[in-house]
Amino acid sequence: MAMTGVQACAAFDSISGSTVATAATIAQVAYPDMRRLGYSGQLATAALATGGTMGVLLPPSVTLMVYAILTEQNITKMFLAAYIPALLAA
């Protein structure tokens, strides 16, 4: 269930691009079920929090766009460069 929560965070991050929205949404959905299945509160919270922070890497990340603009880089190349690290993290 914890790994499924992280994968759900990765999928939602790739759609929304916001780490805060992902952490809040997935936590509302997955946390009660994880507690019901016997996960400790610390493990459930940690798994969902780390999954929610992957939004920085997963395109279309707002952070990647801002960084590309500030450093005058191509946004498409930044997104392509972020895919492999994001998939490895997920």
Image (cartoon, rainbow, N blue to C red):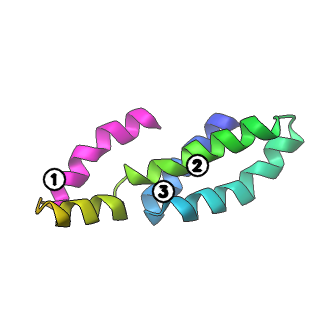
Task: Write the residue at 39% across / 33% down.
Answer: 88
Dot 1 and dot 2 residues touching (CB under 8 Å): no
Is 61 placed above or below 44 here?
below
Answer yes or no: is residue 60 visible.
no
Q: Mark 3: which amino acid?
A: Asp
**Mark 1 or mark 2, which is nearer to you?**
1
- Residue annotated with mark 1: 77
Could you tell me how far apart the alpha carbons at marks 3 and 1 are, in whole angstroms? 19 Å
Task: Write the residue at 56% across / 45% down.
Answer: 51
**Which numbered marker is on residue 34?**
none
Q: Secondary structure at mark 1?
A: helix
Taking the image as shown, residue 5 lies to the left or right of residue 40, namely: left
Spot occupied by residue 29 in the image (x, y as percentages of width and height): 73, 57
Over which residues does the magenta segment extend? 75-90
**Mark 1 vs 2, N-terminal side:** 2
Q: Secondary structure at mark 3?
A: helix
**Mark 2 vs 3, N-terminal side:** 2
Q: Where is the N terminus found, in terms of image quarters?
A: top right
- Residue annotated with mark 2: 8
